[in-house]
Image (cartoon, helix red, strand yellow):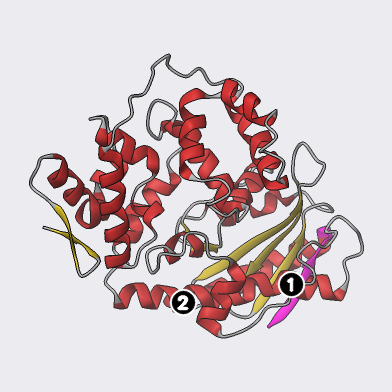
Amino acid sequence: MNIILVNSVKSVAAFEKRFRKELAQLAADERFIAVDTEFIREKLETPLLCLVQLATNTTAYIIDALALDISFLIDIFADESLLKVFHSPRQDFELLCSRGLETKNFYDTQLHEKLLGVDEKIGYHHLVKKYLDKNLDKDYCESDWQKRPLGEEQLHYSANDVVHLREVYKKQFQVLRQMNRHEWLLHEQEYYCRPVESIGKNGNAIFYQLSIWRSEHSVDMRLIPDSLLEEISRKGLSLVRRLKNSRRMRHYQLKNFLEFAEKITANVALPNVVPRKNVVVYFLRAILEAKSIEYGIASSLLATGADLENLANGRDATKCLSGWRKEVFGDCAVAFLKGDLSISMQCYQLVLK
């Protein structure tokens, strides 16, 4: 695999010529690129985009976003005929959009791995190990990507992120096809692309953003459980500020989480409604976990805690009552709410009838 650093006006011209030629020569099943970014977030109010990595089947391009105006990539990211493969790309999208790049037609290996297993937030290194049986070097994970010139080790590390991502995608998609779950991708992608502000009511948008933050920062759900996300979604800024002053919130990840929660709840007016406790939620959660295990799908992909609350209280829960989720979980949940489905135990296993 060739590694090419693009960090000057001259190298941009060479990149555009070579990249287009490579795409034109690709077979249909190879016509996609793997994408990643390197950035610095620590001690900065706005993350600093340092590198954009792209990989075809023969070349890894390392594009210096500090040295260049990367608007020459706009057409590539907007090209709906060209698939862009990412791993957990929400932060990448945020950074790329800040530089004028909107991504069309993409695939998220972390998201779609949830269709193949109950692991809620599998990391890129684990995916490479699972599908390619390779152990990636993590030594440069916290590298200073702002420092110039970039070292050879940094270039190889950043290139590996996209080179192996191409192979992971091909293996993963093959498994999805074998399990007849590749048709679910279109519906999932549609939901995933929906603006956060349009998802749900009564604080569900807040819950969604908090859960994404937790996933992206690989925080143990025992430290920040769904119940905490739901409570913040209902009570908003006042609760976040009380929690920040609590002696129980001294863990560094909790502190960072509450800083983020304070930002997104600061200007959100939540309805002045006192939610009622509903024991039905616990039964719905049991059904959700049973279906998660039965199908080998992450439970959070089927429904969130907020979805279960909405179902139990007769509110809209579109996410789990449409598309493939309806077949896997939604129909059972509705049957239970109508009294047409019972929960029992048999040989210490939950049984749905």
Q: Secondary structure at mark 1?
A: loop
Residue 235 disc label: none
Instruction: Identify the residue at horizontal 46%, vertical 64% (top origin).
Output: 119
Please provide percent x and percent y for residue 256: 70, 41
Please state if 309 lies on the left or on the right of 78 as rendered: left
Residue situated in front as seen by the camera: 178 or 114: 114
Residue 138 disc label: 1
Please state if 266 lies on the left or on the right of 178 as rendered: right
- Check the image and report above or below for 242 versus 33: above
Residue situated in front as seen by the camera: 207 or 348: 348
Residue that extends furthest to the bottom in the rendered view of this protein: 133
- Whether residue 2 appears in magenta in the rendering, the answer is yes
Q: Quadrant of residue 87?
A: bottom right
Q: Which residues are magenta?
A: 1-9
Mark 1 vs 2, N-terminal side: 1
Residue situated in front as seen by the camera: 339 or 118: 339
Residue corresponding to mark 2: 170
Residue that extends furthest to the front in the rendered view of this protein: 347
Please provide percent x and percent y for residue 98: 67, 41
Q: Secondary structure at mark 2?
A: helix
Q: Residues within 10 Å of mark 1 (few under 14, many from 20)?
A: few
Position of the C terminus by quadrant: bottom left
* Disc number lying in front (1 or 2): 1
Instruction: Identify the residue at horizontal 52%, vertical 60% (top origin).
Output: 121
Q: Is residue 56 visible?
A: no
Q: Quadrant of residue 136?
A: bottom right
Q: Is residue 251 visible?
A: yes
What residue type is disc 2 on?
Lys
What residue type is disc 1 on?
Lys
Position of the N terminus by quadrant: bottom right
Residue that extends furthest to the left in the rendered view of this protein: 340
